[in-house]
């Protein structure tokens, strides 16, 4: 697909000139944020009780699975979806899903396969889903919310809901407020301090940035342009791509009941192609942010890679040493232009990994 290209030799100048102004991501702090946080960490909102949003999206791992499982387990023991729990930090800035006719790709939406158009819509799904919090219906969710200690705060902030659906929209709005707060999206990585010229990179980190921008072609999807809404670099263009990820044979979804997975062992995840019913987009998944990438293993939509080193190696030699990797289940639409034969040396792979390590939040100067 067509991507935005940047001048390699000017990478540092571009980054510094675009990020050293006074623009800051300053979210509005409100009661909604506090309410949303209470809901996010409430383990009484699942069936059976014991699982909260934070159970699969913990702060210490960039709001991804704290146990680094390939696929997170649902509230009911032994239930699994087919998708790895994504890092929620920064991905919440994904715009509403639209189709970009110029680049011929969908952009935005939530979940790896883009099945939710907007953030508020996405926040409702896990509460109801059988392989997630397993409440089955909005009525069951709001019934638990009405018994929560903070319910009076919801009514105080939003007013009296006339229907279950209206109350559910309040719940989603409050969680969205928390997920877009500075607590979740702090922009406090070493990279952020580097952009403000408050610190210097090591030699390997500097060279890794050059690889990221140039030879590694990372910046063609994980863009270095500041987001118009936050004024910050989010390291994603929120587009969709089939990068030829191999099947994860250990994915527990293959062994789920036919009620959950009718295809059984033959299941093939078609990504956004299945959501929009367009075969030309089969196998494509949303480009994630790289912020906190070093602490949010495993990687890719099916959790098939366990380390960042493996991911970088895969991107570098996928098409050179194909026998080292399982064949992707969706061969059509595989991106052969921006990865697969990058010709990076082992040293450049290590330098790129060093740079990606600078994207972890809460860096101590």
Image (cartoon, rainbow, N blue to C red):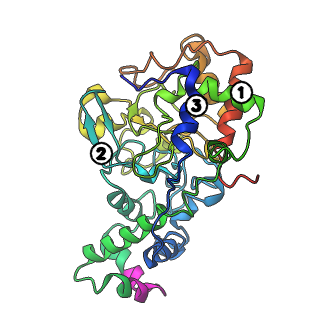
Q: Quadrant of residue 278?
A: top left
Range of the magenta residues?
Answer: 143-154
Number of residues whose C-alpha sits closer than 10 Å to that of mark 1, classed few (under 14), some (14–19) or many (20 or more): many
Q: Earlier in the sequence, mark 1 or mark 3?
A: 3
Judging from the image, what secondary structure is the residue with disc 2 in?
loop
Number of residues whose C-alpha sits closer than 10 Å to that of mark 2, classed few (under 14), some (14–19) or many (20 or more): some
Q: In terms of depth relative to the viewer, which is nearer, 6 or 279?
A: 6
151 falls in the magenta region:
yes
Q: 66 left or right of 278? A: right
Prevailing SS of the magenta stretch: helix
Q: Quadrant of the N terminus?
A: top left
Q: In terms of depth relative to the viewer, which is nearer, 173 or 10?
A: 10
Q: Nearer the viewer, mark 1 or mark 3?
A: 3
Residue 97: assigned label: 2
Judging from the image, what secondary structure is the residue with disc 1 in?
helix
Q: 74 left or right of 355? A: left
- The alpha-carbon separation of the residues under discs 2 and 3 comes to 32 Å
* Residue 305 image offset from top left, x and y in percent: 61, 34
* Above or below for 140 versus 281: below
Q: Please say whether residue 215 is visible from this viewpoint.
A: yes
312 falls in the magenta region:
no
Q: Earlier in the sequence, mark 2 or mark 3?
A: 3
* Residue 224 image offset from top left, x and y in percent: 51, 35
Which residue is at a point 26% across and 73% down the rendered structure image? 165
* Residue 62 image offset from top left, x and y in percent: 60, 53
Residue 13: assigned label: 3
Residue 269: assigned label: none
Residue 351: assigned label: 1
């Amino acid at each position: 697909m067509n991507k935005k290209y940047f001048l390699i030799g000017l990478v540092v100048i571009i980054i510094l000139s675009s990020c050293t102004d006074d623009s800051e991501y300053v979210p509005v702090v409100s009661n909604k944020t506090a309410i949303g946080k209470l809901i996010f960490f409430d383990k009484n909102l699942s069936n059976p009780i014991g699982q909260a949003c934070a159970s699969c999206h913990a702060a210490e791992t960039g709001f991804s699975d704290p146990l680094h499982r390939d696929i997170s387990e649902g509230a009911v023991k032994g239930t699994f979806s087919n998708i790895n729990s994504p890092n929620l930090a920064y991905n919440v800035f994904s715009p509403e899903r639209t189709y970009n006719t110029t680049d011929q790709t969908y952009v935005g939406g939530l979940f790896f396969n883009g099945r939710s158009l907007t953030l508020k819509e996405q926040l409702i799904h896990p509460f109801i889903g059988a392989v997630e919090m397993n409440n089955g219906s909005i009525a069951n969710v709001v019934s638990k919310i009405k018994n929560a200690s903070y319910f009076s705060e919801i009514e105080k902030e939003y007013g009296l809901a006339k229907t279950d659906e209206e109350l559910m929209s309040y719940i989603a709005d409050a969680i969205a407020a928390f997920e877009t707060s500075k607590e979740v999206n702090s922009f406090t990585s070493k990279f952020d301090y580097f952009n403000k010229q408050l610190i210097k990179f090591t030699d390997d980190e500097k060279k890794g940035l050059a690889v990221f921008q140039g030879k590694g072609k990372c910046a063609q999807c994980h863009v270095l342009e500041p987001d118009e809404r936050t004024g910050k670099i989010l390291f994603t263009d929120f587009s969709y791509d089939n990068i030829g990820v191999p099947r994860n044979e250990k994915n527990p979804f293959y062994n789920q009941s036919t009620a959950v997975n009718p295809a059984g062992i033959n299941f093939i995840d078609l990504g956004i192609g299945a959501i929009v019913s367009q075969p030309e987009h089969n196998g494509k998944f949303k480009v994630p942010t790289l912020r906190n990438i070093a602490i949010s293993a495993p990687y890719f939509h099916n959790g098939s890679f366990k380390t960042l080193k493996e991911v970088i190696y895969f991107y570098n030699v996928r098409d050179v040493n194909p026998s080292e990797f399982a064949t992707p289940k969706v061969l059509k639409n595989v991106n052969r232009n921006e990865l697969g034969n990058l010709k990076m040396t082992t040293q450049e792979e290590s330098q790129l990994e060093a740079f990606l390590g600078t994207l972890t939040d809460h860096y101590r100067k």
